[in-house]
Each structure stands twice: as structure tokens, then as C-alpha cells.
Image: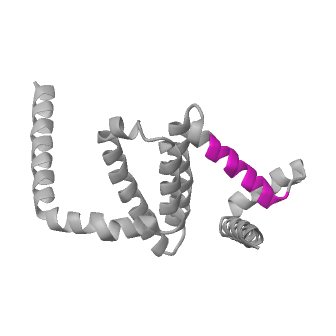
């Protein structure tokens, strides 16, 4: 009886995953159109096609050559396109969502750069990172990270950061004056 219960639970999870794929495709019509065309050519349902692509991508991210590039591509290109759509739309709420994503993405990139030698040893790191980036996009995870960690830090350090930026602007102005003076002579 426990085996039947586990199997029905697994089937329910697959059904929920199928529904979430359909909702995703409805939310992003451009992606849905591409998947629809591929579905018509391959005679495979859209949901099964997406599940196959996701499975292949997950395996590639876990063990494939070039998986860091694929992960960065997924974490950059799709959000960049959605950011473009947000900027072009009259609604400003989505602009805030994508600015928040890019702030968190930038901090994550800096953190990753300085911890690369440690992260290199984590098995399936590219898969984990890609799941994290997709979580930030699809489940508003970027807003959560920004609100809990980045915003309080920046709010506390804002005065010091502004002073450093002002000094940097002063140095840039002096350098520009020096270069312009050198050109005049």
C-alpha cells in the first residue's frame, strides 16, 4: 500500500510540474510560439518537449562540457530579454522587478568571482547556480535576497559609498583636465 501511495504522490508531482510548464508558456507567449513550432515539427506535445529539453539541460549542466557558459547564458539572456520587455511596457512595477534582479545578479557575480576556487570543487555547481538564477527570475527570489540582505547593507553603508564615488569622480575630472591640457599643448 505504501508503494501505491508513493507512486500516486510522484504522479501528482509530475502533474503539478506539467501544469507549471503550461502556466509558464502562457506567461511568456514568445517562448510558447517557439515551443509550438518545435512541437508541430517534431509531433511531440509542448509539455513533453519542454520536459525533454529541461532534462537534457539539467544533465548537461550537471556533467557536460561548457556547463558554466550554458548556466551564465540562461541566467543572462532570458532575463535580459524580459528586462527589455519591461522597459518597453508602460507598467513600471516590472521595471523594479528587473532592476532588483540585476542588482542581485551583480552582487552574486562579484561574490562568485572571489570564491571561484572554492566553488570549483562543489559537484554540480553549474546546475545549482542555474536553479538559483531561475528561482530568482520565476519566484521573485531576487526581491527576497535584495530586501533581506543587499538593501540593509547598502542603506547602512550608503554615506561611505557616496563619498568614495565622489572621490572617484574628482579623480576622473582631474585626469580629464590633465588629458585635455596635454592635448592643448
> Which quadrant: the C terminus?
top left
Side of 147 where 30 appears, left or right: right
Magenta region, main secondary structure: helix
> Which quadrant: the N terminus?
bottom right
Residue farthest to the right, as pictured: 43
Query: How far across and how far down the image is residue 2, in percent?
Result: 72, 71
Side of 158 where 85 appears, left or right: right
Query: How far across and how far down the image is residue 72, in percent?
Result: 50, 44
Magenta stretch: includes residue 100: no
- The relative height of residue 9 versus residue 177 in the rendered view (above or below) is below
Viewer-proximal residue, 115 or 122? 122
Query: How far across and how far down the image is residue 155, in percent?
Result: 20, 68
Residue name at image x 15 percent, y 62 percent? 157
Residue name at image x 81 percent, y 50 percent? 38
Residue farthest to the top, as pictured: 185
* Count of residue discs: 0
Please name the colour scheme applied to the rendered image.
Answer: one colour
In the image, which residues are magenta? 45-59
Query: How far across and how far down the image is residue 144, in percent?
Result: 39, 70
Residue name at image x 71 percent, y 66 percent? 10
- The relative height of residue 49 versus residue 12 in the rendered view (above or below) is above
Side of 49 where 81 appears, left or right: left
Side of 33 where 80 appears, left or right: left
Task: Say which quarter of the image contains residue 163.
Answer: bottom left
Amino acid at each position: 500500500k505504501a508503494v501505491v501511495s508513493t507512486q500516486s504522490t510522484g504522479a501528482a508531482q509530475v502533474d503539478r510540474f506539467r501544469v507549471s510548464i503550461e502556466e509558464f508558456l502562457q506567461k511568456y507567449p514568445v517562448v510558447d510560439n517557439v515551443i509550438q513550432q518545435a512541437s508541430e515539427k517534431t509531433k511531440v506535445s509542448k509539455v513533453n518537449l519542454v520536459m525533454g529539453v529541461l532534462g537534457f539541460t539539467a544533465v548537461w549542466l550537471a556533467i557536460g562540457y561548457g556547463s558554466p557558459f550554458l548556466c551564465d547564458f540562461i541566467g543572462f539572456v532570458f532575463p535580459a530579454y524580459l528586462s527589455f520587455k519591461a522597459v518597453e511596457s508602460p507598467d513600471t512595477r516590472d521595471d523594479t522587478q528587473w532592476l532588483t534582479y540585476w542588482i542581485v545578479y551583480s552582487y552574486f557575480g562579484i561574490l562568485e568571482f572571489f570564491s571561484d576556487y572554492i566553488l570549483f570543487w562543489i559537484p554540480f555547481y553549474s546546475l545549482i547556480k542555474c536553479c538559483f538564477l531561475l528561482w530568482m527570475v520565476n519566484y521573485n527570489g531576487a526581491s527576497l535576497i535584495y530586501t533581506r540582505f543587499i538593501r540593509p547593507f547598502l542603506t547602512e553603508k550608503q554615506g561611505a559609498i557616496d563619498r568614495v564615488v565622489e572621490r572617484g569622480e574628482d579623480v576622473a575630472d582631474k585626469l580629464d583636465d590633465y588629458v585635455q591640457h596635454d592635448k592643448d599643448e
